[in-house]
Image: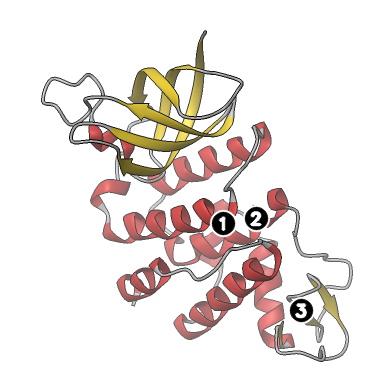
């Protein structure tokens, strides 16, 4: 049967000389792999540039409940990005967030709330011009709410440490190295308490931003099985200076 669904591109892999398999996080079916034949041919109705990381799609797909590689009937980039492909900072943010999402949502079932968050966040990234330096930090901390390890804010207060392993604020330094000292824990809290509209008001130094990103990735490694190392943040940090 044919179904309409929105989708978010995660990864495109060559399948043959003219075909690809694209992994898409869909609104209706969760993470799926789709074979698209002939996409590299000049007369293909579906264009390869529609399948760039985190591009937003309207799709008509064939779906088999037995799983495996699915097929696409129609696909279009909707909404069309106005800035992300042409802005080096935004495109670097997208590549980084895409790598994190790909490693965090490996076998994810349909989740309408998570899908809406991702879709809306990407739309916001395409439209905003301010607050970009903090966008990825806020995005990743908000994403933990949907992945099941959102920080426990019960004891969030001045002078508290944040324990990355337990995901909570504590009064004393934890007996391991995976924690944030109170000064950084306070900045971590300010990021969590922000929203996409006021990221430009967060005053975080470049050094603190780099440090906190490393700790956020460590937090993910603590709570996402097989998360491993992320490489694209090095490019992002270089672009942002």
Quadrant of the image occupied by residue 237: bottom left
Q: Is residue 37 left or right of residue 175?
A: left
The front one of 195 and 73 is 73
Residue at 65% from the left image edge and 76% from the top image edge:
187
Question: What residue sits right under mark 3 in the picture?
Answer: 162
Quadrant of the image occupied by residue 192: bottom right
Residue at 75% from the left image edge and 59% from the top image edge:
149
Crowdedness near tag 3: few (<14), some (14–19) or many (≥20) residues, C-alpha within 10 Å: many
Question: What residue sits right under mark 2 in the picture?
Answer: 142
For residue 191, above or below residue 110: below
Where residue 169 appears, as percent x and y from the top left, is 83, 76
Question: What residue sits right under mark 1 in the picture?
Answer: 139
Q: Distance of mark 3 from mark 1, alpha carbons?
A: 19 Å
Label 3 sits on a secondary structure element that is strand
Q: Distance of mark 2 from mark 3, alpha carbons?
A: 16 Å
Instruction: State which tag comes first along the sequence, 3 or 1.
Output: 1
């Amino acid at each position: 049967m044919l179904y309409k669904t929105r989708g978010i591109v995660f990864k495109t892999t060559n399948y043959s000389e003219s075909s690809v398999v694209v992994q898409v996080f869909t609104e209706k079916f969760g993470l799926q792999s789709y074979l698209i034949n002939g996409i590299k041919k000049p007369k293909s109705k579906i264009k390869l540039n529609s399948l760039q990381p985190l591009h937003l799609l309207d799709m008509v797909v064939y779906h088999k409940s037995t799983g495996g590689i699915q097929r696409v009937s129609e696909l279009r980039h909707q909404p069309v990005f106005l800035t992300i492909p042409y802005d080096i900072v935004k495109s670097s943010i997208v590549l980084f967030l895409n790598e994190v999402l790909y490693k965090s949502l490996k076998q994810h079932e349909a989740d309408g709330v998570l899908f809406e968050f991702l879709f809306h966040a990407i739309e916001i990234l395409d439209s905003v011009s301010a607050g970009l330096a903090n966008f990825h930090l806020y995005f990743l901390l908000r994403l933990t709410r949907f992945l099941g390890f959102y920080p426990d804010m019960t004891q969030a207060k001045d002078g508290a440490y944040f324990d990355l392993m337990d995901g909570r604020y504590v009064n004393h330094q934890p007996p391991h190295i995976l924690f944030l000292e109170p000064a950084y824990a306070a900045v971590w809290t300010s990021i969590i308490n922000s929203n996409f509209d006021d990221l430009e008001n967060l005053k975080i130094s470049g050094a603190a931003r780099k440090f906190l990103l490393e700790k956020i990735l460590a937090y993910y490694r603590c709570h996402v099985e097989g998360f491993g190392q992320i490489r694209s943040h090095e490019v992002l940090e270089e672009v942002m200076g």
